[in-house]
Image: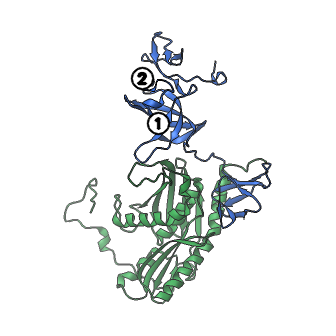
Amino acid sequence: NSHMYVCERLCSTEDCIPGTGTYLRHGYIFASLTGYVLRKNEGEELPVISVVRETETQLLPDVGAIVTCKVTSINPRFAKVHILYVGSTPLKDRFRGTIRKEDVRATEKDKVETYKSFRPGDIVLAKVISLGDVQSNYLLTTAENELGVVVAHSEAGAQMVPISWCEMQCPRTHAKEFRKVARVQPEYLQA
Amino acid sequence: MPVDTKRIRGPEESQSPLLFLSPGKVPEASSRQGVRGNGDARPVFARCGLISQAKGSAYLEAGNTKIICSVYGPREAERKDETDMKTGRLVCDFRLAPFSCLKRGAWIQGSEERDLSQTLQESLQPGVCLHRYPRSQIEVNVMVLENDGSILAHAVTCASMALADGGIEMYDVVLGCTLRQSGSTCLVDPSYSEEYGSWQEGYGEDQGCVTVALLPNLNQVSGLTADGEMREDILSDAVRSCMDGCHKLYPVLQQALMRAVKKKAPPPAK
C-alpha cells in the first residue's frame, strides 16, 4: 500500500488519522512531503496515514531530548557546546547550546566550578531544557546521573577512564582530573 | 554601484566589442521560434537530486533558459532581531551567472537580483510549512545559467522542486508562469528576445509582462508581479492564462519528483 505522492490530497479525515509528513486542511489530509504513503493500523479505530522518505527527517533538538555535544569553550558561569547528535541520529549542521553553571549538577549547585566539570573538547551527554529565547542558544542540563562527560582527553592527550562521578584518570600518566562524569549503562559500554 | 576590483581592465581607450555588433533584428510577435502557439509554454526538462552536498537540488530547462537550485537546511538561524521562536525563516538568494546574458554581468549581486530574490522569497514562503522548523532557517540558492526569458517564473518552479527534493515539509509546490503582452498579442513563457525585444522601441500602452506564482492543489496565488501598462481586462485574462500554464506544468514536476524519490530509495517493505 505504498504509492508515491507529491504534496497532494490523500484522503478525508473520516478515513484516516494524519501522521508524520501530512497536514490537515478543510477536513482533508494532504501530504506535505514527497515520498511513500504508509497506512498503518495502530489498533485504534482509524488507520494512521503518513508520508515517509527514506532519510530520517532532520530532527531538531526538542525540549526533553537527550543530545550528544562537544564542549567548545568554558567560562566560570557556563560552558558552550556544539550539539552533534540528537538521540542516535547525527545532525548535518551543528546547533549551539549552553550549559549553565547551575545546571551542571543536581546537588550543591552553587559550589560548581565549570573548570572541574568540563574542558574544551569533551563529549558530553546532556538534555535540552529549553529552546532558549532570541538572544541565547539551546539551554542544556547535565544534572542527572546518566548525563555528563562521556569521552574526555587528559592534558597528556590520552583518553581518560572514569573512576567516580567526579573524577577521571589518564592511563598513561595516572593523573586524575576532575570532570562531571556520566554513569553510562553497562550495556552501552564496549569492552 | 558595486565595482568589480579584482579584474584587470584594459587601457582606458578600449571599448567593448559588443558595441560594434549590428543590433539584432527584433522578431515579429506572430512568429515564434519553433512550432508553438502564443498560449503554449516551452517544453520543460526537470531533474532533482543532482547536487550531492546540498540537502535538495533541482535543475530546470525551458527552451534555452537553464536554472539550477540548491536547498540547505534547516540550519541554525543567525541570531538577528527578527528571529521568530515559533517559525523558521526562508532565505532566498537569486543569482544570474555572469555568462548567462548576452552582456557579461558582475559577480556581485546587483539591485535587480536582490529584487528578484525578495520576490522569490515572498512567492515561496506561503508554500513551506515553516512552523515545523522553529528557530531554524532554510537557505534556497538559485542560479540562472542561461537567461532566455521568464527566469523568475522558472526559478520559482525550480526552487520549489528543490525544496520538495530536500524533504522540507510544504503545503504545496509553487509553480510560476510568465506572460508578455506586446500590442495585441499575448505570449505565454516568452523567450529573451520576446520579453525584452519590443521594449527597445519605447514604453507605450499595451506593453506589459506578468509573472504569477501558483499553488496548484490549493489553487492559491502566492506571487504576482506585473510590469508595464496593461488594461484591466487584459491583465485579469493574463493572470488566468498564467494560472492555466502553471496547471499544465504540474504533471512534469510530479514525474521529476517521483523519479528522484524512487532513485533515492526503493519503496519500503511492508
| Label 1 CA crowd tier, 10 Å (few <14, some 14–19, many 20+) | many
Give the image quarter of residue B198.
bottom left
**Which of the pair A120/B105 is nearer the observer?**
A120
Residue B259 visible from this viewpoint: yes
Amino acid beneath label 2: Lys
**Which of the pair B199/B213 is nearer the observer?**
B213
Q: Position of residue B43 (x, y in %)?
A: 59, 71
Mark 2 belongs to chain: A
Q: Secondary structure at mark 1?
A: strand
Residue B32 visible from this viewpoint: no
Q: Would you place residue B155 above or below residue A69 in this image? A: below
Q: Position of residue B264 (x, y in %)?
A: 65, 50
Q: Position of residue B127 (x, y in %)?
A: 55, 63
Disc 1 vs disc 2: Cβ atoms closer than 8 Å? Answer: no
In this rendering, the count of numbered labels is 2
Give the image quarter of residue A145.
top right
**N-term mark: 1 or 2:** 1
Q: Which mark is residue A124?
A: none
Q: Which mark is residue A82?
A: 1
Q: Which chain is green?
A: B
| Image side of residue B19 versus residue B102, left or right | left
Mark 1 belongs to chain: A
Residue positioned most to the left: B12
Rendered shade, chain A = blue
Q: Which mark is residue A111?
A: 2
